[in-house]
Image: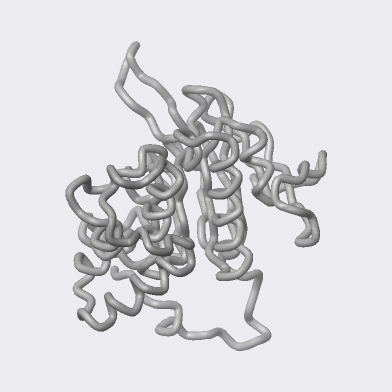
Amino acid sequence: MSVADDEDRPVPPREARSAPTPIIEFRDITKVYGSGDAEVRALDGVSLRIEEGEFVAIMGPSGSGKSSAMNLIGCLDEPTSGDYLFKGVRVNDMSRAERTLLRRNFLGFVFQGFNLLARTTARENIELPLIYRGSSQAERDRLVARAISVVGLGGRAHHTPAELSGGQQQRVAIARAIVTEPALLVADEPTGNLDTRTSQEIMDLITRLNREQGITVVMVTHEPDIAAFARRVIRFVDGRVESDTGQRSPEQPPGAALPQGVSGHAR
């Protein structure tokens, strides 16, 4: 089984088409660590769908299962049981090499701690995913320049992380995440190390990426004011989806309060 572009997949006749294939689908997913008296069910029968173009925040207390869910979404771990489908393709059936290709070609990651290489410049950090992908120098130059422009890094591209503020470092991390033009941006506490003003700027940037470029965003956060940037909020408790609420209309400003009691997609 291989990870293929959508263009390679046959399009069914119009009368046979059903609802659009979600970019992420969990079907009765469980994740169990340990065994016997030491067994921990991090995820306990989770089913959910995330459609292309959504901006979803995942919340929950420590130990709720949100990090386990994010690790599965990012193909960094495997479920104990159940099915994980990415764009309709069953990730469970993929080899380790195929999951690596999926991450490399379809996913971008942003972390709380930035995870930048200390002795390389911002530009070199942004370029790394393209080197791993085997892109030509011309393509790397084009895509890196575009990513730097999108995140507003300006004249700081040739500075090392130590010469950048926390907000600038996170902009580098976001540029690195989007330089491969991924379908999905996975953000784990992206403002956790930032002050309030800088957090607002970073969330404005992530919101623009979702709205203007159509990148699906799945973000873990503990902070309600950060989750309010998303159009949908999934809350985990004890390994299960406790609530799934959202959709903010496109006219609502970033950070506006989410409407209450709107049914989500968890099943």
**In the rendering, at what x and y percent does residue 251 appear?**
80, 60
Query: Which residue appears farthest toward the bottom when viewing the image?
Result: 13
- Residue shown at 68% from the left, 85% from the top: 15
Residue 107 visible, this orientation: yes
Residue at image point 58% right, 26% down: 237
In the image, is 141 to the left or to the right of 20? left
Q: Position of residue 57 (x, y in %)?
A: 59, 44
Q: How many marks?
A: 0
- Which one is nearer the viewer's eye here, 57 or 190? 190
Q: Nearer the viewer, residue 157 or 36?
A: 157
Q: Quadrant of the N terminus?
A: bottom left
Looking at the figure, which quarter contains the C terminus? top right
Quadrant in which residue 224 is drawn: top right
**Looking at the image, is 239 positioned above or below residue 15?**
above
Height in image: 24 above or below 28? below
**Which quadrant of the structure image shows residue 126?**
bottom left
Judge whether 15 appears above or below 198 on screen. below
Q: How is the image coloured?
A: one colour
Extreme residue toward the top, this view? 37
Q: Nearer the viewer, residue 62 or 96?
A: 62
Q: Position of residue 123 (x, y in %)?
A: 29, 62
Q: Please report the residue visible at 34 percent of the width from the left and 79 percent of the height from the top.
A: 142
Q: Is residue 267 visible?
A: no
Residue 196, x across and y down, in percent: 59, 35
